């Protein structure tokens, strides 16, 4: 498939901005329009230093059909990262998740159908499978989301599939495990633990801290997405993306304090959140078999890269931790 023009929604967020950076670096023939509402999780600093001749930024909401159609004009491919994403916030305010994640995806799908987009990549999540206590979930496993965030992502995931089966829109659906790496908002586990440790502040661990997640370095995730964008014959399918490396939040907390030379006493157990899934796990044999994709960054290397990035970019995260974030943090963790 020709490279052409991309519309990347949510491209100023964590994974979206890493995808934009990776795509511009690895695909010289690509031009990108980023559409982002710039909520608390969107940050224009994530796009600083990129080639302005190949990158256009549009501030707007994916729920606004007029803005979406204007931003999508001329795009051959659409990659939809735009979403409300934090489980904790979905418990506090589920309506905003339904609106952005489901209705916003509908607006994008409708525009893509009308405008003849050649490929639409819907970024879903491994959380749609719900709590996985047995064998890792394969792509056709039942969807059993257990919180408003994962439920809204499951709705968008299946809505996107319906546009493939009903209208023939060339949709690709990806379900990735937990990401970590540079430019992640400080409400998420890795940057919250790292930045709190750097400030000698408590690192809040929900419950026992033994809940397991498959962790993939964000650079590997966006490379898998790049391959899916250009691979033939992948439309109408779901693709799991993960590393197979499962670690608990407590283990990650101890790794971070050890790496930074901080005391383990910074790790503080707090009241568990409602319906906290004990484990997510993905079977990623399909993408390995069909596209020969294997993550290149192991957990130890990814952890070192991530900790170093936040240690070296205090100016980036100190700005994010001011103001409204402080109010949210104190409400969420009661520390």
Image: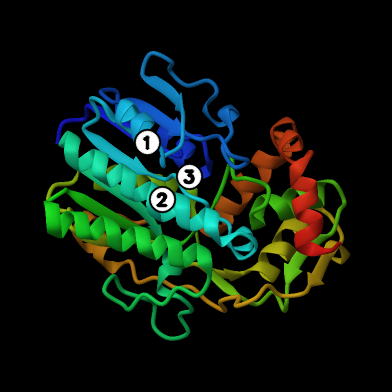
Q: CA distance from mark 3 to mark 1?
A: 11 Å
- Which residue is identified by label 3? 15
Counting labels gives 3
In this rendered view, identify the residue nearer to me: 171 or 39.
39
In this rendered view, identify the residue nearer to me: 241 or 115.
115
Query: Dot 1: within a 10 Å radius of its alpha carbon, few (fewer than 14), some, or many (20 or more) residues?
Result: many
Q: Residue visible at 65% across and 57% down?
A: 189
Q: Residue visible at 48% across and 44% down?
A: 15
Query: Dot 3: within a 10 Å radius of its alpha carbon, few (fewer than 14), some, or many (20 or more) residues?
Result: many
Callout 3 secondary element = helix
Picture coordinates of residue 31 (x, y %)? 31, 23
Q: Nearer the viewer, mark 1 or mark 2?
A: 1
Q: CA distance from mark 2 to mark 3?
A: 8 Å
- Residue 163 visible to an observer of this rendering: yes
Callout 1 secondary element = strand
Mark found first going from the N terminus, 2 or 3? 3
Q: Quadrant of residue 20?
A: top left
- Residue 25 visible to an observer of this rendering: no
Q: Is residue 252 above or below residue 184?
A: below
Circles 2 and 3, Cβ within 8 Å, touching? The answer is yes
Q: Quadrant of residue 19?
A: top left
Q: Quadrant of the N terminus?
A: top left
Left-right relation of 77 to 68: left
Q: Is residue 6 above or below residue 176?
A: above
Q: Residue visible at 36% across and 18% down?
A: 54
Q: Is residue 85 above or below residue 254?
A: above
Q: Nearer the viewer, mark 2 or mark 3?
A: 3
Q: Residue visible at 55% across and 23% down?
A: 48
- Which residue is identified by label 2? 221
Left-right relation of 105 to 18: left
Query: Dot 2: within a 10 Å radius of its alpha carbon, few (fewer than 14), some, or many (20 or more) residues?
Result: many
- Which residue is identified by label 1? 8
């Amino acid at each position: 498939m020709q490279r052409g023009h991309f519309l990347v929604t949510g491209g100023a967020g964590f994974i979206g901005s890493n995808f934009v950076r990776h795509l511009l670096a690895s695909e010289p023939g690509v031009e990108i329009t980023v559409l982002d509402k710039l909520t608390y999780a969107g940050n224009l600093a994530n796009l600083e230093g990129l080639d302005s001749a190949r990158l256009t930024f549009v501030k707007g909401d994916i729920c606004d059909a007029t803005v979406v159609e204007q931003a999508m004009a001329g795009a051959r491919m659409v990659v939809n990262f735009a979403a409300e994403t934090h489980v904790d916030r979905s418990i506090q305010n589920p309506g905003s998740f339904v609106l952005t994640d489901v209705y916003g995806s509908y607006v994008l799908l409708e525009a893509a159908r009308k405008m003849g987009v050649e490929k639409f990549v819907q970024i879903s999540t491994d959380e749609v499978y719900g709590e996985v206590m047995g064998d890792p979930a394969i792509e056709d496993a039942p969807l059993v989301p257990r919180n408003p965030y994962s439920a809204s992502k499951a709705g968008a995931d299946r809505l996107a599939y319906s546009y493939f089966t009903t209208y023939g829109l060339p949709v690709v659906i990806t379900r990735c495990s937990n990401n970590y790496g540079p430019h992640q908002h400080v409400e998420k586990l890795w940057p919250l633990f790292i930045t709190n440790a750097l400030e000698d502040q408590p690192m809040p661990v929900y419950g026992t801290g033994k809940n397991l997640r498959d962790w993939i370095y964000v650079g590997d995730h966006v490379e898998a997405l790049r391959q899916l964008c250009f691979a033939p014959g992948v439309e109408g399918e779901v693709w799991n993306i993960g590393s197979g490396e499962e670690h608990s939040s407590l283990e990650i907390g101890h790794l971070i304090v050890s790496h930074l030379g901080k005391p383990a006493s910074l790790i503080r157990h707090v009241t568990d959140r409602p319906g906290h899934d004990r484990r997510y796990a993905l079977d990623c044999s399909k993408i390995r078999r069909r596209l020969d994709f294997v993550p290149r960054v192991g957990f130890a290397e990814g952890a070192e890269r991530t900790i170093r990035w936040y240690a070296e970019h205090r100016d980036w995260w100190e700005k994010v931790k001011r103001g409204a974030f402080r109010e949210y943090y104190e409400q969420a963790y009661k520390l």
